[in-house]
Image (cartoon, helix red, strand yellow):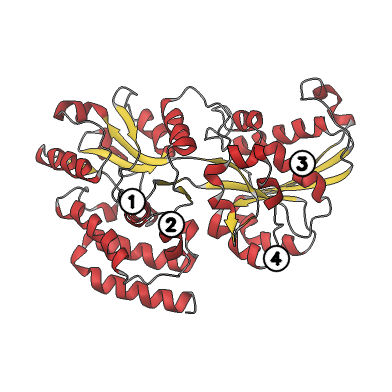
Amino acid sequence: MHSMFKRTAAALAASVALAAPVSAELTGELRIFLDTSNPAPRATMEAMIERFAAQHPGLEIETTVIDREAYKTQIRNFLTADTPDVATWYAANRMKPYVEAGLFEDVSDLWAEPEIAENLASTKGAMTIDGKQWGVPYTYYQWGVYYRKDIFDELGLSEPTTWEEELANCQKIVDSGRACYTIGTKFLWTAGGWFDYLNMRTNGFDFHQQLANGEVSWEDDRVKQTFANWKQLIDMGAFIDNHQTYSWQEALPFMVQGDAAAYLMGNFAVAPLREAGLTDDQLDFYQFVAINPDVELAEDAPTDTFHIPANASNKEAAREFLRFVVSADEQTEINNGKNLGQLPVNAKSSVDDDKFLQEGFKMLSTNSPGGVAQFWDRDAPAEMAKVSMEGFQEFMVKPDNLDSILAKLERARQRIYDN
C-alpha cells in the first residue's frame, strides 16, 4: 500500500478555527513519509498533520503513507533519492545505519531547547548516537511484570522491589503448585525481554548498550552474572514447562487460568488478558525489581520516531513539525485510547484513565533514571539479535549449556561486528 494526499491552506479553512493560533512564517512544501499504514495510526497521523497545517497556512504539506513492511525495504532508497522532509522510523540501533551513512539530520539543536530537553529526558538516550540526537520520539509503551493480584493476595504476597523479594515470592508461588511466570519462546523475542531486564538490572543501561554494540565479550564475567541470576529462576521452576512450543499469545491462558502468576511483557498484553476475562481487580503491574543497587533502573520501552533526512529540502519547516509532534498537547492527543493507545513521550502530557497506562507513564517519566532501551531485537544488529535470542531460548531449556552458548555467541560477535 502506497498512498499520498496533500493538505493546502484552502482545504484547511474549516479546521483553522479549531487549531492553535495561526502563524504564517513557514512557506513552501513539506513532504512527510509515514509507515503508519494500519487504520488507527494512519488516521491519528493524518489528523495531527492537519492540525499542524492549520497553524501554518503558507505551507503546502504532501503526505505519503507506505505499508510498514514495504517501508523497511524502501527507506534507504528514498533517503538518498526523492527525499522527503520528515520520515518515520525507530530509535536506537534501528536508526544507526542511516546515521552512520549520513542520511539523517543532526537535530541536537532541538534537544538543547528547554521544552524538549526537560520534558523528553527519558527518551534522549534512545535518540543519541555519538553524543548527538538524530530525531524525536512520538510514542512508546512500557514493559514490566503483569501479575495476578488475586493470587498474590491468596498467598499473602506484596509487589517486590528487590531481587531477594522476587525470589522469595517466586518460591511461595512454586510451592503453591503454580509457575511464577508464563512465557512463550517459540518466537524468540520474548526471551530477549527477560535478557534485557536481567542484564540492565545486573550491569546497567550503558553496559547493555555496549554489549548490543559488540563492544563487550559474551564471555565477560559481568555477562555470566546476568545468566547466573537468570539461572536462579530457572532452577527453582519459575517458568512454565515447554515454553519453547508456545507463542506469546499461546502463553496467555496459563495466566488467565491461574497456572502462572505473572508475565513479563509489553502493555499490549493487557487487552487480550482483559478480553479473556481477567478484571482489573485481578490484574496488576509492577516495575521489574532492582538486582544490583549500584545501577539505575532502565526500562524496555520500544519507541517510534520522526527524523529529518539529511537531504531534506525544507529543514526549517521539518524542525517546526518535530517540535509540534513532541509538544505536550499533541502527545496527549495522539497517544490517547481513541488514537494510538500508548504512552506520550512528553512528561507534561496527560494519560488516559487506564491504570496500566497511568502506571507505565509514571514509571517511564519519573522512575526510570537509567534510560530507555528499545528491546534486544531493535538494540542489537539483526544477525546478532537472532543468534543471541536462539541462545537465550536454549539456555532457558538447558541452563547447563551456558558455557557452550556463550562461546557460540562470542564467535558470532567477532564475526558480525568484524572485531
Disc 2 designates what residue?
376
Q: Position of residue 120 (x, y in %)?
A: 58, 41
Residue 38 makes an appearance in the image: no
- Taking the view exactly as shown, the residue that stands out farthest to the left is 175
Spatial distance from mark 4 to mark 3, Cα to Cα? 21 Å
Name the amino acid, label 2: Trp
Q: Nearer the viewer, mark 3 or mark 2?
A: 3
Spatial distance from mark 1 to mark 4, Cα to Cα? 37 Å
Disc 3 designates what residue?
320
- Tell me if mark 2 has few (under 14), some (14-19) or many (20+) residues whose alpha carbon lies within 10 angstroms of its own: many
Name the amino acid, label 3: Glu
Q: Nearer the viewer, mark 1 or mark 2?
A: 1
Q: Which one is nearer the viewer's eye here, 375 or 166?
A: 166
Mark closest to the chain's N terminus, 4 or 2: 4
Residue 348 makes an appearance in the image: yes
User: Circle 1 — which element?
Assistant: loop
Determine which quarter of the picture holds residue 278. top left
Disc 4 designates what residue?
102
Mark closest to the chain's N terminus, 4 or 3: 4
Q: Is residue 34 left or right of residue 91?
A: right
Q: Nearer the viewer, mark 1 or mark 4?
A: 1
User: Circle 2 — which element?
Assistant: helix
Q: Nearer the viewer, mark 4 or mark 2?
A: 4
- Tell me if mark 3 has few (under 14), some (14-19) or many (20+) residues whose alpha carbon lies within 10 angstroms of its own: few
Q: Position of residue 122 (x, y in %)?
A: 52, 43
Name the amino acid, label 4: Gly
Disc 1 designates what residue?
294
